């Protein structure tokens, strides 16, 4: 059973549909980013699904944009916003009350930074990606 305070805190993350599309409960975007932070990024986006029907039979489109750093930055930012939006909710939903209570306490030392320097962790990979890679 959830404590009242925890439920109230989580209620800020409850999402609702606008009512315009009650039959659709998911978000769908179509873009592929290759080396988005490099000097020569590639953005692939459009309505096609990379399927036989989509690429041969249907009237779909796909744009390949190479070297446009602005387009790559915009779509990478959009991807990271969506990814972090749903990842944080997933983490919160998996936590027990005790884990959440412990997680919400401020940490006064640098003990929380270890994962950002552990070469095999997702946190370290993200730090290197967005920090330019050479932050050791």
Image (spheres, rainbow, N blue to C red):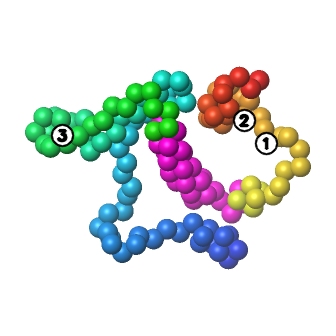
Q: Is residue 69 left or right of residue 130?
A: left
On residue 112, the disc is 1
Q: Is residue 21 left or right of residue 87?
A: left
Rendered residue at 67%/77% (across/down): 4
Rendered residue at 40%/72% (across/down): 18
Q: Quadrant of the C terminus?
A: top right
Label 1 secondary element:
helix
Question: Is residue 87 visible in the rendered structure shown here?
Answer: no
x and y, in percent, of residue 90 in the image = 55, 54
Task: Tell me, yes or no, whether the highlighted magenta stretch contains residue 61.
Answer: no
Q: Which residue occupies the foreground of this view, 38 or 94? A: 38
x and y, in percent, of residue 92 in the image = 61, 58
Compared with 82, 129 (above or below) is: above
Task: Name which of mark 3 and mark 1 comes first in the sequence.
Answer: 3
Instruction: Choose mark 3 or mark 2, whichever is in front.
Output: 3
Using the numbered discs, state the Cα–Cα distance from disc 3 to disc 1 in whole angstroms: 47 Å
Q: How many marks?
A: 3
Q: Which residue is mark 2?
A: 115
Task: Tell me, yes or no, whether the highlighted magenta stretch contains residue 91.
Answer: yes
Quadrant position of residue 98: bottom right
Label 2 secondary element:
helix
Q: Main secondary structure of the magenta part?
A: helix
Q: Residues within 10 Å of mark 2 (few under 14, many from 20)?
A: some
The boundaries of the magenta stretch are: 72-99
Q: Which residue is mark 3?
A: 54
């Amino acid at each position: 059973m959830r404590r009242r305070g925890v439920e109230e805190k989580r209620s800020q993350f409850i999402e609702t549909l606008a009512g315009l599309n009650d039959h659709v409960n998911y978000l769908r975007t179509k873009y592929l980013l290759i080396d988005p932070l490099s000097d020569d990024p590639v953005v692939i986006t459009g309505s096609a699904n990379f399927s036989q029907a989509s690429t041969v039979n249907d009237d779909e489109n796909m744009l390949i944009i190479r070297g446009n750093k602005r387009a790559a930055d915009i779509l990478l930012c959009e991807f990271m916003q969506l990814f972090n939006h749903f990842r944080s909710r997933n983490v919160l939903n998996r936590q027990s009350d005790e884990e959440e209570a412990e997680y919400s306490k401020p940490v006064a030392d640098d003990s929380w930074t270890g994962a950002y320097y552990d070469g095999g962790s997702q946190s370290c990979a993200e730090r290197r990606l967005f920090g330019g890679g050479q932050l050791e």
